[in-house]
Amino acid sequence: DDKMADRWQKDADGILIFTGLFSAAVSVLLAVSIQDLRPNPQDTAAFYLANIYQLLADPNISRASIPATPATLPPFSPPRYAIWVNSLWFLSLVISLTSALLATLLQQWARRY
């Protein structure tokens, strides 16, 4: 029985090391890919600069005829691939952290056994 508990504890050590490294790698990839779910601030700035340029470049527009309300940005919707990829990254991270939790619980049980 002691040998079996010792083997389980060593297996749990390996699982903890692997899940720790895997979770770290997935977290980095998730931090990079989550940017696709947000609108790009450079696109927003370019949109407003283009509107300002159109207003200032047209010599026929007087200052009184400049619209009081600025042009609105087109609505942003993230690409479908970005939603799928980030969903899979999140799912992978949750499974990895759950595995680490279960391995920790196994280690605690093996110590008591």
Image: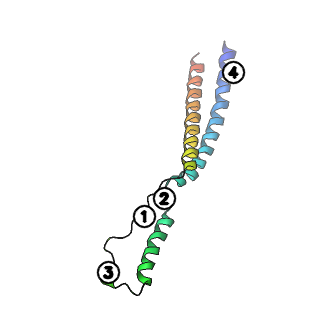
**Residue density around tag 2, few if under 14, some if 14–19, many if 20 or more, within 10 Å:** few
Instruction: Tell me which residue sits at (56%, 44%) in the image.
Output: 84
Helix, strand, or loop for circle 4? Answer: helix
Q: Amino acid at mark 2?
A: Pro
Q: Is residue 82 above or below residue 93?
A: below
Looking at the image, the residue that sits furthest to the bottom is 59
N-terminal of the two: label 1 or label 3? 3
N-terminal of the two: label 2 or label 1? 2
Helix, strand, or loop for circle 3? Answer: helix
Q: Amino acid at mark 4?
A: Arg
Of the numbered discs in the image, which one, if any, rests on residue 73?
1
Of the numbered discs in the image, which one, if any, rests on residue 7?
4
**Residue density around tag 4, few if under 14, some if 14–19, many if 20 or more, within 10 Å:** few
Looking at the image, the residue that sits furthest to the top is 1
Of the numbered discs in the image, which one, if any, rests on residue 39?
2
Alpha-carbon span between mark 2 and mark 4: 50 Å
The residue under label 3 is 65
Instruction: Tell me which residue sits at (58%, 48%) in the image.
Output: 81
Q: Amino acid at mark 1?
A: Leu
Q: Amino acid at mark 3?
A: Ser
As rendered, which of 98 and 20 lies closer to the eye?
98
- Residue 17: percent from left, percent from top: 65, 35
- The quarter of the picture where residue 109 lies is top right
Is the N terminus in the top left, top right, bottom left or bottom right quadrant? top right
Instruction: Tell me which residue sits at (55%, 25%) in the image.
Output: 105
Alpha-carbon span between mark 2 and mark 1: 11 Å
Alpha-carbon span between mark 4 and mark 1: 60 Å
N-terminal of the two: label 4 or label 3? 4
Alpha-carbon span between mark 1 and mark 3: 21 Å
Instruction: Tell me which residue sits at (32%, 70%) in the image.
Output: 69
**Residue density around tag 3, few if under 14, some if 14–19, many if 20 or more, within 10 Å:** few
